Image: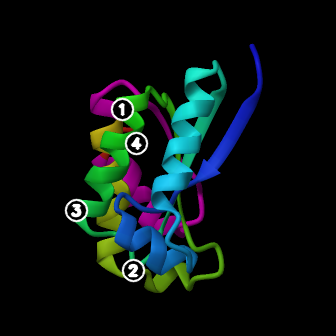
Amino acid sequence: EGSFLNVSLDSGTRETYARIKGLDAWNQVTENICRYKKEGGNIEAKYIILPENCSERDIEGFVRFCQRIGIKNINVSCNINADHAALPEEIVNAAINLTKLAEAYGAAVKVLPYFGDENMKLIMKEIGRE
């Protein structure tokens, strides 16, 4: 079984990581994740979707990174403090796209229930989990 790491990367590019986390540490963080995985660690990746990281480029970059190193468990969330009834459509669409892309390579994706009831219904419908 080994050790377990839950990491909230929240980006798919170095630029977005720096903007969201306030630190230009993408290379160091992703290298450490890769090293941990190579040493047999079990990793669960989390992506908290925000207006600043919901671009197609970021979503695809995150999924490609997870696929490349073999991360098979992904959690998708949004800002739990956001007004979930008024979430921008781009955030909901990013959750749908991220889930579909990750599931296409075989990852188990859990969409956390922080998108609000109506948005969760839409997300579940679009990803085929009605």
The answer to the question of whether label 2 and label 1 lie on touching residues, with beta carbons closer than 8 A, is no
Q: CA distance from mark 3 to mark 4?
A: 24 Å
Q: Name the residue beneath numbered marker 3.
A: 56
Say if 11 sits above or below 22 in the image: above
The type of residue carrying mark 2 is Pro
Tell me the residue at 60%/38% (across/down): 44
Q: Which one is in front, 44 or 123? A: 44
**In the structure shown, which secondary structural element does the residue marked by tag 3 occupy?**
helix
Q: Is residue 77 visible?
A: yes
Is 111 colored magenta in this rendering?
A: yes
Tell me the residue at 41%/38% (across/down): 66
Q: Name the residue beneath numbered marker 4.
A: 130
Q: Name the residue beneath numbered marker 1.
A: 67
N-terminal of the two: label 2 or label 4? 2
Q: CA distance from mark 3 to mark 2?
A: 12 Å
- Circle 3 Cα neighbour tier, 10 Å, few/some/many (<14 / 14–19 / ≥20): some
The type of residue carrying mark 1 is Gln
Q: CA distance from mark 2 to mark 4?
A: 26 Å
Q: CA distance from mark 4 to mark 1?
A: 26 Å
N-terminal of the two: label 3 or label 4? 3
N-terminal of the two: label 1 or label 3? 3
Percent x, y for residue 89?
A: 31, 76
Q: Which residues are magenta?
A: 103-126
User: In the rendered image, which quarter contains the C terminus?
Assistant: top left
Is 30 colored magenta in this rendering?
A: no
Q: Nearer the viewer, mark 3 or mark 4?
A: 3
Q: Name the residue beneath numbered marker 2.
A: 51
**In the structure shown, which secondary structural element does the residue marked by tag 4 occupy?**
loop
Q: Is residue 36 left or right of residue 91?
A: right
Percent x, y for residue 15?
A: 36, 72
**In the structure shown, which secondary structural element does the residue marked by tag 1 occupy?**
helix
Q: Nearer the viewer, mark 4 or mark 1?
A: 1
